[in-house]
Amino acid sequence: DDLIGLFLERSEYMIISILSVLKSGGGYVPISPEYPKERIDYILKDINSKVIITNQVVLDTHGAEFLDIEVLVVEDGLWKDSPDSNPELTITPE
C-alpha cells in the first residue's frame, strides 16, 4: 500500500520496476531524472516514499536528494533471488 518512487530513465528497467511494484501491492510514482531539482524535491516530499528505485547513473547524478530514503539500484540484481510465485497479501480499497 506504499508509494514507490521510480527515478529511472525510460528503459527495460522501468517496465520491470512498474510490474514489480504493482505485483507487490504498492503504487508507483514515475520521477524523470530530467525534472528540475525543485520538482524532484516536491514529488519526493509529497509521496513520502520509504523506497526509491533507480539506476547507478541517476544515483551518481542525484544521490544527495535521497538522504532519508532507502535506495534500490536496479543494476544490483534486485530480482535475481526473488521467488517466482505471487506474494501472499490482501489489498483492500481502504
Image (cartoon, rainbow, N blue to C red):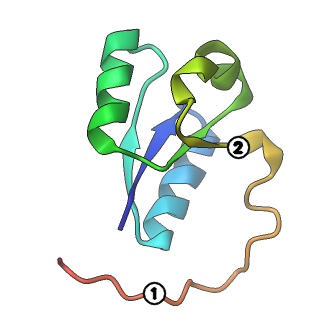
The quadrant of the rendering that contains the N terminus is bottom left
x then y, percent, for residue 11: 59, 35
Is disc 2 placed on a helix, strand or loop? helix
Q: Is residue 44 left or right of residue 52?
A: left
Residue 50 versus residue 60 in the image, above or below? below
**Residue at coordinates 54% horizontally, 40% vertically from top-left?**
69
Residue 3 versus residue 81 in the image, above or below? above
Can residue 87 be seen here? The reply is yes
Q: Earlier along the polypeptide chain: callout 1 or callout 2?
A: 2
Crowd around label 1: few <14 · some 14–19 · many ≥20 (10 Å): few
Residue 89 versus residue 3 in the image, above or below? below
Crowd around label 2: few <14 · some 14–19 · many ≥20 (10 Å): some
Q: Is residue 13 left or right of residue 4?
A: right
- Quadrant hosting residue 61: top right
**Mark 2, residue position:** 74
**Residue at coordinates 49% horizontally, 71% vertically from top-left?**
23
Q: Is residue 30 left or right of residue 86?
A: left
Q: Which mark is residue 89?
A: 1
Can residue 9 be seen here? The reply is no
Q: CA distance from mark 1 to mark 2?
A: 24 Å
The quadrant of the rendering that contains the C terminus is bottom left
Q: Is residue 85 left or right of residue 41?
A: right
Q: Amino acid at mark 1?
A: Leu
x then y, percent, for residue 63: 62, 22
Is disc 1 placed on a helix, strand or loop? loop
- Quadrant hosting residue 9: top right
Q: Amino acid at mark 2?
A: Val
x then y, percent, for residue 52: 53, 42
